[in-house]
Image (tube, grey):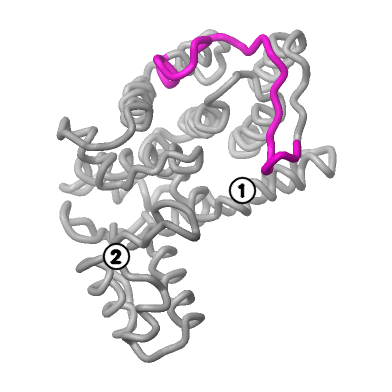
């Protein structure tokens, strides 16, 4: 953490903070199905016109407004949680800023993988969770993870639970060290999205939150390692990475046009599996992203 604090004291820190804020917003919304690229999110935040579904644009604007409240929100206040949700979901859901009054669950296809507690229990469950958060003797790192898991288990809102829960963990961590406002943990979660859901499912199956705590602590650690010395020039890639010639060629081909994995394999005279491994590496380095579905989508250079 101290290395990251020092990094944020350099002359380019304002640019880096802004870039990380954009990453946080893009990643948190992408987890929830928003299809906008990081560049499109950046354009919206910078006031540029973007051709995209109105709801997705509104989600970005709302998320920015909510994240800008960061320093004013009290992570130990239910009232502030409702306020943040109200801003995050304004114009998206009619009950923004209010606990749900309907049954909710998490579905995988048509299968319900988690049925949330009934709506009449939500206010009391949330009060108990915040009461525990205030008085617990556990380290703030642990408390933030437990809160995040229990929040998603309760699923207190009709919509926006994921993005609000991730923001709130960041707020709790901010009480331990203010640098967490500018550390895009959401970006790491986005890169490990299935593992994120698997960790929630494993904790639910175990009846306690240890699997989710371990997953989130690992993500926080990896994010700190990744950003503590990152060089940033405000325009090109923020990371100096050791890419192979083939991986650089893939980036060049993707920049020119939309190319399928099979087309890339044929062009580079390698197998499709090799291209998939290279794309996985480029995605891990935050250089490319997948837009759309597995069948009809395409790879984009970030």
* Residue segment shown in magenta: 87-112
Label annotation for residue 196: 1
Q: Is residue 271 above or below residue 35?
A: below
Would you name the residue on which mark 2 appears? 258
Direction from residue 133 to residue 88 in the image, left or right: left
User: Residue 150 in the image: x percent, y percent?
Assistant: 70, 29
> What secondary structure is found at the residue carrying circle 1?
helix
Please name whichever residue, 27 or 32, is drawn nearer the observer in this view of the structure. 32
Dot 1: within a 10 Å radius of its alpha carbon, few (fewer than 14), some, or many (20 or more) residues?
Answer: some
Is residue 97 covered in magenta?
yes
- Residue 234 in percent (x, y) is at 17, 52
Q: Nearer the viewer, residue 280 or 260?
A: 260
Q: What's the residue at 16%, 34% (across, down)?
A: 49
2 and 1 marks in contact (CB < 8 Å): no
Q: Position of residue 199 (x, y in %)?
A: 69, 48
Q: Secondary structure at mark 2?
A: loop
Q: Residue furthest bottom?
A: 269
Return the x and y of residue 247 as percentages of the image width and height: 33, 78
Residue drawn at x 32%, y 27% as measured from the top left:
54
Which residue does the image show at 20% across and 68% down from the upper left?
A: 256
Q: Hey, which quadrant is residue 232 in on the image?
A: bottom left
Q: Quadrant of residue 129?
A: top right
Q: Main secondary structure of the magenta part?
A: loop
Q: CA distance from mark 2 to mark 1?
A: 29 Å
Note whether 271 is above or below 232 in the view shown: below
Using the rendered image of the protein, determine whether residue 234 is visible from the camera's viewpoint: yes
């Amino acid at each position: 953490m101290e290395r990251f604090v020092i990094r944020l004291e350099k002359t380019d820190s304002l640019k880096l903070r802004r870039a990380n804020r954009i990453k946080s917003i893009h990643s948190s919304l992408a987890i929830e199905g928003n299809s906008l690229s990081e560049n499109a999110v950046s354009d919206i935040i910078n006031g540029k016109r973007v051709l995209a579904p109105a709801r997705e644009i509104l989600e970005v604007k709302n998320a920015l407004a909510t994240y800008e409240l960061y320093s004013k929100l009290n992570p130990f206040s239910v009232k502030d949680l409702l306020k943040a949700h109200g801003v995050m979901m304004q114009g998206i859901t009619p009950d923004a800023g209010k606990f749900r009054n309907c049954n909710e669950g998490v579905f995988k296809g048509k299968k319900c993988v988690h049925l949330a507690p009934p709506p009449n229990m939500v206010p009391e469950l949330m009060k108990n969770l915040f009461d525990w958060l205030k008085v617990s003797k556990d380290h703030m790192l642990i408390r933030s993870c437990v809160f995040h898991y229990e929040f998603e288990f309760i699923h207190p809102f009709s919509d926006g639970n994921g993005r609000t829960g991730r923001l709130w963990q960041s707020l709790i961590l901010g009480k331990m060290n203010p640098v967490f406002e500018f550390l895009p943990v959401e970006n790491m979660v986005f890169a490990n999205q299935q593992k994120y859901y698997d960790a929630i499912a494993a904790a639910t199956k175990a009846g306690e939150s240890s699997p989710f705590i371990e997953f989130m602590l690992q993500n926080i650690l990896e994010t700190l390692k990744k950003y503590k010395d990152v060089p940033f020039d405000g325009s090109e890639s923020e990371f100096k990475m050791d890419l192979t010639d083939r991986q650089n060629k893939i980036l060049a081909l993707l920049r020119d046009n939309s190319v399928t994995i099979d087309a890339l394999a044929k062009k580079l005279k390698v197998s499709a599996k090799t291209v998939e491994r290279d794309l996985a590496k480029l995605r891990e380095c935050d250089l490319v992203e997948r837009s759309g579905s597995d069948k009809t989508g395409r790879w984009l250079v970030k």
